Amino acid sequence: MAAESPPPLKPRALPVFSDEGFGDKFLRKTRENPLVPIGCLCTVSILIYGLISFKRGNTRHSQLMMRARILAQGCTFAALLGGMVVTAMKSKK
């Protein structure tokens, strides 16, 4: 049996990134996955409200807000992972 030479490999084209500023990139990423910034805003809002409750001495309400913050962080993380999976699936096509 004669060994055949392997077919030549074609290099992939590298992606071209335009010069975009922070604001442009933030808007583009927000349009791609709007649940992540919404989740971040909810998390920060709950955190601030919980800290205000703690400062006022309402410890029960403060504890509830800290538990809600953990839940909001989990939802934000799930949205982030979901967006990464969708982006990976789009790039495979």
Image: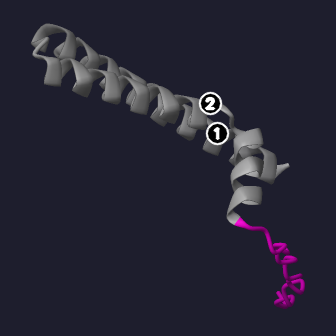
Q: For this rendering, which residue is in front, 2 or 73?
A: 73
Query: Are the two marked residues, 2 and 1, in contact with CB atoms closer than 8 angstroms?
Result: yes
Q: Main secondary structure of the magenta part?
A: loop
Is 3 one of the magenta-colored residues? yes
Quarter where residue 58 is shown: top left
Residue at the location (85% across, 75% down)? Answer: 16
- In the image, what residue type sits under mark 2? Leu
Quarter where residue 7 is shown: bottom right
Residue at the location (79% across, 53% down)? Answer: 91
Residue at the location (86% across, 88% down)? Answer: 4
Q: How far across and down, in percent of the image, does residue 33 sit?
A: 69, 38
The quadrant of the picture occupied by the N terminus is bottom right
Q: Is residue 61 above or below residue 31?
A: above
Q: Which mark is residue 35?
A: 2
Determine the secondary structure under disc 1: helix
Q: Is residue 25 above or below residue 48?
A: below
Q: Which mark is residue 83?
A: 1
Q: How far across and down, in percent of the image, does residue 37 sit?
A: 58, 37
